[in-house]
Image: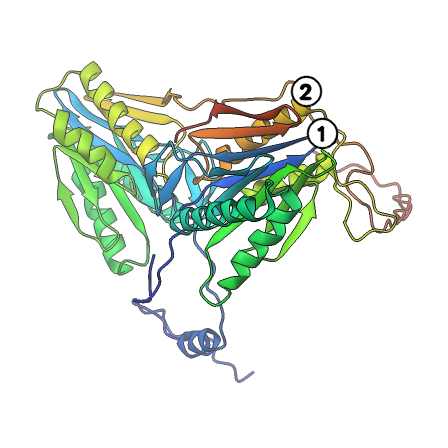
Amino acid sequence: MAKASVDARTKGGFSFDLYQRNEMLLKKGLQLPKFRKTGTTIVGLVFQDGVILGADTRATEGPIVADKNCEKIHYIAPNIYCCGAGTAADTEAVTDMISSQLQLHRYATGRESRVVTALTLLKSHLFGYQGHVSAALVLGGVDVTGPHLHTVYPHGSADTLPFATMGSGSLAAMAVFESKFREGLTKDEGIKLVSEAICSGIFNDLGSGSNVDVCVITKGQTEYLRNHQLPNPRTYTSTRGYNFTKGHTEVLTTKVTPLKSKKQAAEVDAMEE
Amino acid sequence: MALRGDWVYENNGGTCVAIAGSDYCVIAADTRLSVGYSIYTRDYSKICKLADKCVLATSGFQGDMKALQKNLAARHLIYQHQHNKQMGCPVMAQHLSNTLYYKRFFPYYTFNILGGLDSDGKGCVFTYDAVGSYERVGYSAQGTGAGLIIPVLDNQLKSPSPLLLPAKDAVTPLSEVEAVDLLKDVFASATERDIYTGDKVEIVVINASGIRQELMELRKD
């Protein structure tokens, strides 16, 4: 057979093979599928013993709430967590990937992961995708060098900050932080301030809502307070209940297809253990 | 989100619902006014009393809603001077349709529901599109939460088409209390999933004894 037996070694970088096809499709009026964005409020702050991260729990698809109680604080390492805003699939995928890479790194080095390692991995990944991976992250953790808090932007830049907010509700949350933050908060004060900032996002930003998730990271211990506050209970439930009687929804056609009777299986000996 | 320099409209969100009964009509609308991802106010009435037994609920662009309400109220006053009586609900319905179509080529960006009692004292609900196409129905919903509410009302109320012969009664067999309970539950549900619906719901009930109003709290997130 005169077939090329070895494929050309895959080179790094982008593949533009589908460029012409995509252009043709766009000209024909193809709508690219919409991504689910989390329309979020995420925050982080450094307090006297470590860092505290906070997030709301609403995921939106345009004007509709797709998930009323999703988890936006992602695990990266036992001492490092990351809040994600932007496209839900992107934040999920990128944090899972870096978390796996860090675990392999821990096995290789025999040491606890450092926040700057996660930061560098995230930055270089996002930069490589030139902003197409729409993940805006608040990365926080405590390692041997101390507590760290960073924001990472979709194009791959990052900042190091004492307090940070991201997402559509970031302005509402930042207003609270700018007014009430000070260095050296205690754990309870920090949790209270983070909750207040997230609540500000929840009530004033339409893209954020439902509950408050908090994650407290200190040297040697992490507390993940899932649904720390539930300030939005349903206001009314009908006691009458709903009746879905037949005939309320018109049935236009009915077709019943009986399943074929199963053929008898031939007697076989069981596999030996 | 004006992408063109000449885009003059804005969608302020919100949901309106109305149900017609044998001797009552309930109209409800949430009270949130929003733009983009922000809230302008949590306390904005989208319901306007046009006549004694006739109430209009509007969702869409509230600037146009205010202008439309003013227009209708003024024309109603003229009608009263000319005919020495209030406009009945079906009369107002036709009038609203004409007013909307008058601006066919620069429309009012409004999605209206007109509710009230007809001359027999039966509940009536008229539902409109932005340029005046209207229909008398047993129930309706308009606005950002309409897509979430109408399927539930279709299942629970099942209004027959007005085109059926012999003519079937469009009103629901539910009592006034049951209809208000259904409305409250349906609004609470729409609030869970639509970001533009919430804060409070204003419920107006029209029956033979007059017009009654009540407010119910909704989720504020």
Which residue does the image show at 61% across and 37% down from the upper left?
B18
* Residue occupied by mark 1: B23
Which quadrant of the figure contains the C terminus of chain A?
top right
In the drawing, does residue A19 fall left or right of residue A214? right
Front label number (2 vs 1): 1
- Please identify the quadrant where the N terminus of chain A is shown: bottom right
Is B49 drawn above or below residue A194 in the view shown?
below
Residue at x 35% of width, y 63% of height: B7
- Residue A84: in sight, yes or no? yes
Which percent across, then down, holds residue B54? Answer: 59, 38
Pick out the residue farthest to the left: A183
Quadrant in the rendering for residue A189: top left
Q: Residue at (82%, 43%) from the top-left corner? A: B168
Tell whether B51 sits left or right of B107: right
Amino acid of disc 1: Asp
The answer to whether tags 2 and 1 share a subunit is no
Residue at the spot of label 2: A240
* Chain identity of mark 2: A
Q: Secondary structure at mark 2?
A: loop
Residue at image position (26%, 42%) is A137
Relative to A53, is B89 on the left or the right? right
Q: Mark 2: which amino acid?
A: Arg
Callout 2 touching callout 1 (CB < 8 Å): no
The local crowd at label 2, few if under 14, some if 14 to 19, many if 20 or more residues have their Cα within 10 Å, is few
